[in-house]
Amino acid sequence: MAWRVVLAGLDPVVAAMLAAQLAPCAEVEVVRAAEGEEGLEAALATLPDMVVLDAATASALAHRCRKLEAELARAQAALGDREAIDQAKARLIRERGLSEPQAYRLLRRQAMNEGRRIADIARDIVAPGNRAAVLRD
């Protein structure tokens, strides 16, 4: 099985020299990424064993990675909020006999009254052993 090496963002002369040096190796397949981000994405889609980048391309990828990590963290936090709210609504429905819209309105009203986020009120309600947290009208 050949090693797949992607060359991306390199000066054309440098890329040609590297490709020429690797060409005699039967175990190495050289993939030269086309210009721009789309070219790099296409080359990375080949699942390379090694990627050779110039500094600017590496920096751009690192910046993009940090942005994606921040976006993932925000999505995970939003999902956690949604799960807490759903659990709190279920508890209010079960223990207070409310409908789902009524349970949500109660959570929203409590959050507004206390100047807190709905998710924080919901977490109080679903906290283990917190029987007193089921809201009063």
Image: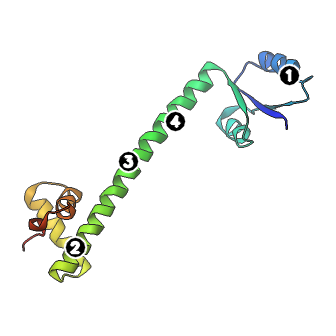
Mark 1 / mark 4, whichever is N-terminal: 1
Give the label on residue 91, or none. Answer: 2
**Mark 2 vs mark 3, CA separation in Å:** 26 Å
Residue at 80% across / 33% down in the picture? Answer: 3
Contact (CB < 8 A) between labels 1 and 4? no
Foreground disc of the pair 1, 3:
1
Residue 102 appears in view: no
**Mark 1 vs mark 3, CA separation in Å:** 43 Å
Location of mark 3 (residue): 74
Q: Quadrant of the N terminus?
A: top right
Residue at 52% across / 36% down in the picture? Answer: 65
Foreground disc of the pair 1, 4:
1
**Mark 1 vs mark 4, CA separation in Å:** 29 Å
Location of mark 1 (residue): 22
Residue 97 appears in view: yes
Amino acid under disc 3? Arg
Assign a secondary structure to mark 3: helix
**Mark 2 vs mark 4, CA separation in Å:** 39 Å
Contact (CB < 8 A) between labels 2 and 3? no
Amino acid under disc 1? Leu
- What is the crowding at mark 1: few (fewer than 14 residues within 10 Å), some, or many (at least 20)? some
Q: Position of residue 27 (x, y in %)?
A: 87, 30
Contact (CB < 8 A) between labels 2 and 4? no
Mark 1 / mark 2, whichever is N-terminal: 1
Amino acid under disc 4? Cys
**Mark 1 vs mark 2, CA separation in Å:** 64 Å
Residue at 17% across / 64% down in the picture? Answer: 125
Give the label on residue 65, or none. Answer: 4
Q: Position of residue 18 (x, y in %)?
A: 81, 19
Mark 3 / mark 4, whichever is N-terminal: 4
